[in-house]
Image (spheres, rainbow, N blue to C red):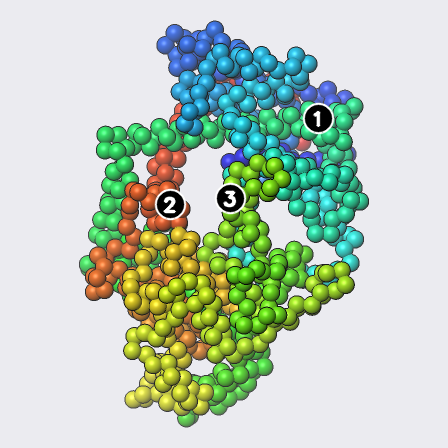
Amino acid sequence: MNAKKKTAAFALAAVLACGALAGCDALTVHNLTEDYGRTVATVNIGTGAAFQDEKGEFAEYKDDAEELIGTSEITKRELVMSFLSNGSTLVQSYGMSVEQAFDYLLDNLIQQQAYVQYAKAYLLKHGSPNEGETYSITGYKTAVGGVDANATKAQKDAASLAYFLTDEEEAKAKYDLRVAINSAIDSQEEGLIKATDEHDHTADSDVRTTPTGANTVSEDFYDTKYAIYTGKETSLGTYEKLDGSTVATRKAAYNLFISNLYSSEQLKKGEDTTKIETTDYFARQLVSQYQAAIIEKLGDKFEQEAIANLAGEEGDSWAKDLYDEAVANQQAAFTGEKSESIKSSFEEAFNAISDSSFVFAPYDYDYGYVLNILLPFSTLQTEELNSFTNDFGDAKGAKYAARARLLEKVKGTDQRGTWFTGHENYSYKGGADAFTGGDATREYLFFENSFTKSKDDTDGEGNVIKTAQYEKIKNYLGNYTYNGTVELDDDGDVEKVEPNRIDIDGFLTEMKKYMESAGTDLEFVSVGGYDNAKLQDGYFERENFYKDGKVDYEQFIYEVGKVKKFAKGKFNPDEMFVAGTPENTAFSVINELSFAYNTDTAGLNSYLGYMISPYQTSYMKEFEYAAQLAVRLGAGSYVVVPTDYGWHIIYCTFSFADVSTENGGDGVAFHFDQSKTTQEGTFSYLFFEQLKSNVVDAEISSRRSDILAEYAEACSEKFVYAYKDLLSL
């Protein structure tokens, strides 16, 4: 769900807490219905100077202020719902008293209404952020005047707000509300299903970490046929029933939901709860969704204006100017003079690199990031390793020769078995693109929604779908089948999962073939003068790990390689997060294999992996040496090396070496291009979004604060007597 449109979801979350409301004496009075309907505050910015003074911002609407703005009444019910959603956090986490919490929440409700009223007036005067969408006071009056005279207040409020929304925006708001209601019912049904579920599931805490973004619904998606499921509907659109859901469990969950609504006075006796969308409760929640949509629309309008003001006569160059300034500042801060303090500052910044935090100039060009895939020693192998005597009487306790012999026995396994056996089964049978490693019995992939429903399309049944239903998982190719066997029971449920065991050569074969299957020129080639045949010759019987009385860490290297595309050409950091580029595809292959085999779980869902310094680190020395080598060889390189933990397959995801002047670069990691600011994933897109967040959002926040300061208190009135009993809870 769009993060900007969670108003209804918050209200619905409170409903789940309302089951105990009827039995809570402090919130219960003799006539609860009448009491909850009392007005605790009113808001009407149409009575303020902006409308009533001849030089006011909206003076031209003075005669229409009452019809355009009207008086918003905040009820005690709304205040109680807000407290149930947020009150405990304010009291327990922020140290407020109950009275302070209620006052704070009421002020927020007043500000919300004042801002919505302002948004209506501002959009009417200045137009929509959507090209071609216009408003007029005449059109507004016609739209509002067409509402049924017998409509409830909530229905009339919804109509006055809907005038400022497109058909798509209305459909999206209704879809979001239906999703929120289904989610609330789902929460009830999950408990009922668990109580009757006879299957043995892997505990949630033991389920393998899933990639960030798996099964995430697109923010802009909506489905006009999506239905609230009460247990009797047969046509549900894109709603997906819970695993284990039955008609009986759904009806029971829906009845619990309705009971909570009655307990919290959200429903009135006599309303037809078999058709939830006809109730006044649904209308009130829809008003909240429409209000959120209009606030978002005003924000979009403010954003357009803020960007236009920043651009001024210089056009789009403002973003390029800020980019140039950021690069110059970092070059001055990190390059040139060498010192521990500068190095520390650089590493702090580089370690925090993200979609919104960039490092352009390096302290040293041999800094980079690596993904580490660990194929570990088993518990018994670790015990055996610890029992070995030291090599050649080495006083430091080294056991490298004995460890080398043990490494041949290390077997890696696909760690994704719990993606079948947890409460949620993420698996599905893959299609023609699925990589099986030549084993036809391997057919299961994961996260079907994120790959088969992440493309713009319609469902062929008349559903109006704005965009892809789910987001595609970023930096994760999604074609690597589970490397093992899966057995099903008579009902088609997963009964047994058994991973295949592969040694280091088996894993490297899988890695190379999967990379090659991902695209032209993505196969791995030897690089840097390293001959893998010589590196591996006699490796498991090797004893020459010392040279001149010191550990020769180069002797630990088992294999070195690099993606062919980058071995013969440059890696472009500007496009490393753009889906479909060689840079991103190669990264996605290794990232997926990491989720499949890696037992170093700290590396899962990291941004680029582990930061690697060319100086002394806290990593184990074998790992340090190999990771530093991979970074020097550049992004797309890998180095295989062991430690006392097992085999490490170290893949360089990013390296400043790729942009060094010695390698033909200009010394700057990322480059801004105004023409690419709308291409998702490019550095230019990410940088521009960060600028808007830092610069434009600050401007919008400032404007909002000014608006609320002018209108919220001056154009509102509180009726403390109506909620005084709540303050003594």
Which of labels 2 and 1 is toward the front? 2
Please tell me the numbered disc located at residue 279: 1
Q: For marks 3 and 2, give the CA distance.
A: 16 Å
**Which quadrant holds the C terminus?**
top right
Regarding mark 3 in the picture, which secondary structure is present there?
Answer: loop
Residue topped by disc 3 = 456
Name the outermost residue toward the bottom.
392
Q: Nearer the viewer, residue 146 or 632?
A: 146
Q: Is residue 296 above or below residue 351?
A: above
The image shows residue 219 at horizontal and vertical percentages of 52, 40
Which of labels 3 and 1 is toward the front? 3
Please tell me the numbered disc located at residue 679: 2
Q: For marks 2 and 1, give the CA distance.
A: 43 Å
Which of labels 3 and 2 is toward the front? 3
Report whether 562 appears left or right of 718: left
Instruction: Identify the residue shown where x is 21% and y is 57%.
Output: 666
Q: Quadrant of residue 536?
A: bottom left
| Amino acid residing under circle 1 | Thr
Instruction: Identify the residue shown where x is 76% and y is 40%.
Output: 231
The image shows residue 206 at horizontal and vertical percentages of 62, 62
